[in-house]
Image (cartoon, helix red, strand yellow):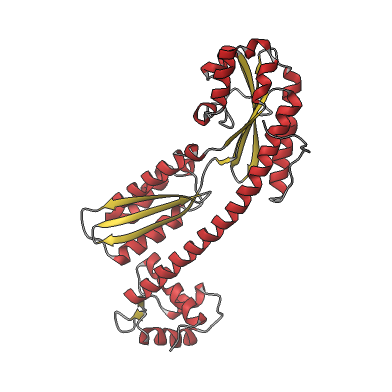
């Protein structure tokens, strides 16, 4: 006897209903929650077949059915397989988009340097307000779990959880369903104390595991993507066009700074306080957070790609820079990037480029 589509749908409904209620599931209940449009009698016949196949049992005469270990195993294996395929497909898509995105960003930063005669920098967009995509607890032993958290951008964090007492596969399955039902699609700011309290209450004796999972979520989201941050620069040689910056020692420090991603990261934090309504931030001389740029002015703006992804574009020049021209260029590029990426993933760079990168 095969587990065809109808039986699979009914079995899935039985498992999810039982995990939610903890009560044996009857045919009338299933008829209300499936889209099969089948009578209770037909569903009873299918449930009888599922019982014969070892997927469900009837704990008491005249009671409904509950899933067996065999059913839980099938359910979990399918769930993991679906999520694995989903992540693999997303990875392939992201690789293609990233390659295209890098081409555009490198072109834009060159144009900005050429148009302003200053040094330009541009950070690749990163996720802000990252959302939880998937949580998977896997039982490595009766007293140890592997916790896998996936957030937007397919950023993955693994964490081992040691337990003070044994846990069964069924209990792990229930926790997976609880955690994914309550936390998927939420940002860290969405996960408030009230929600945490409710989920821990639902988890009962396993509330400590919920706490461990939440710690992992917080860690991976707060980490952002600083380690993987991409910052592109162009026009470093433009520094020598301005006497106040062309001193060999000053110029050397500036050029070295442009090669240090961690230092430039101080400028590429989207949405900083102090920026104006257009998202433009101006650092003049001593206002700069970078010591080697105290003789410079730095003007930055934030662009958006939708879905919480933001990046920063910036211009570095002398304190006597043409601020109006710089701001006009930043506003133009910011608007072009935001519009291009929000409308089409295949969008071309918003400007023409006939120059090579410095």
Up the image or down, 69 lies above or below 295; here it is: below
- View extreme (front): residue: 248
- Position in image of residue 81 (x %, y %): 46, 67
Q: Residue at x 55, y 13 (%)?
A: 249
> Which of the 4 image quarters holds residue 317?
top right
**Rendering coords of residue 227 (x, y %):** 47, 38
In the depicted structure, whether residue 2 falls above or below residue 77: below
Residue 305 vs residue 34, the one in the foreground? 305
Q: Is residue 196 visible?
A: yes
How many marks are shown on the rendered structure? 0
Is residue 50 shown left or right of residue 96? left
Q: Nearer the viewer, residue 84 or 64?
A: 84
Toward the left, the furthest residue is 165
Q: Position of residue 8 (x, y in %)?
A: 47, 78
**Residue at image point 74% right, 38% down:** 336
- Which percent across, then down, holds residue 57? 33, 80
Q: Nearer the viewer, residue 180 or 111?
A: 111
Q: The N terminus is located in which quarter?
A: bottom left
Q: Quadrant of residue 26?
A: bottom left
Left or right: 8 in relation to 309:
left
């Amino acid at each position: 006897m095969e587990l065809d589509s109808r039986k699979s749908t009914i079995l899935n409904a039985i498992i999810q209903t039982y995990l939610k209620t903890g009560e044996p599931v009857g045919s009338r209940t299933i008829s209300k929650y499936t889209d099969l449009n089948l009578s209770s009698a037909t569903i009873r016949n299918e449930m009888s077949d599922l019982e014969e196949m070892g997927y469900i049992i009837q704990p008491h005469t005249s009671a409904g059915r509950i899933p067996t270990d065999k059913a839980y195993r099938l359910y979990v294996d399918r769930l993991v397989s679906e999520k694995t395929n989903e992540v693999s497909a997303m990875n392939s898509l992201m690789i293609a988009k990233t390659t295209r995105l890098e081409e555009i960003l490198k072109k834009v930063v060159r144009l900005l340097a050429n148009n302003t005669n200053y040094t330009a920098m541009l950070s690749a967009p990163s996720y802000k307000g990252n959302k939880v995509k998937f949580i998977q607890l896997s039982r490595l032993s009766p007293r140890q779990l592997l916790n896998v958290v996936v957030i937007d951008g397919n950023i993955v964090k693994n964490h081992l959880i040691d337990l003070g007492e044994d846990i069964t596969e069924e209990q792990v399955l229930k926790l997976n369903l609880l955690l994914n039902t309550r936390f998927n699609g939420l940002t860290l700011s969405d996960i408030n104390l009230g929600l945490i309290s409710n989920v821990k209450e639902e988890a009962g004796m396993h509330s400590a595991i919920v706490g461990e999972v939440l710690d992992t979520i917080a860690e991976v989201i707060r980490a952002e993507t600083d380690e993987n941050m991409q910052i592109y620069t162009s026009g470093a040689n433009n520094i020598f066009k301005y006497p106040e910056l062309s001193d060999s020692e000053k110029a050397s420090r500036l050029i070295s700074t442009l090669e240090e991603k961690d230092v430039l990261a101080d400028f590429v934090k989207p949405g900083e306080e102090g920026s104006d309504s257009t998202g433009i931030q101006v650092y003049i001389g001593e206002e700069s957070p970078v010591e080697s740029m105290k003789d410079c002015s730095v003007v930055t703006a934030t662009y958006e790609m939708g879905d919480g992804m933001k990046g920063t574009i910036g211009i570095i020049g002398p304190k006597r820079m043409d601020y109006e021209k710089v701001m006009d260029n930043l506003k133009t590029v910011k608007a072009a990037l935001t519009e291009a990426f929000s409308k089409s993933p295949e969008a071309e760079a918003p400007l023409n480029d006939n120059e090579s990168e410095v």
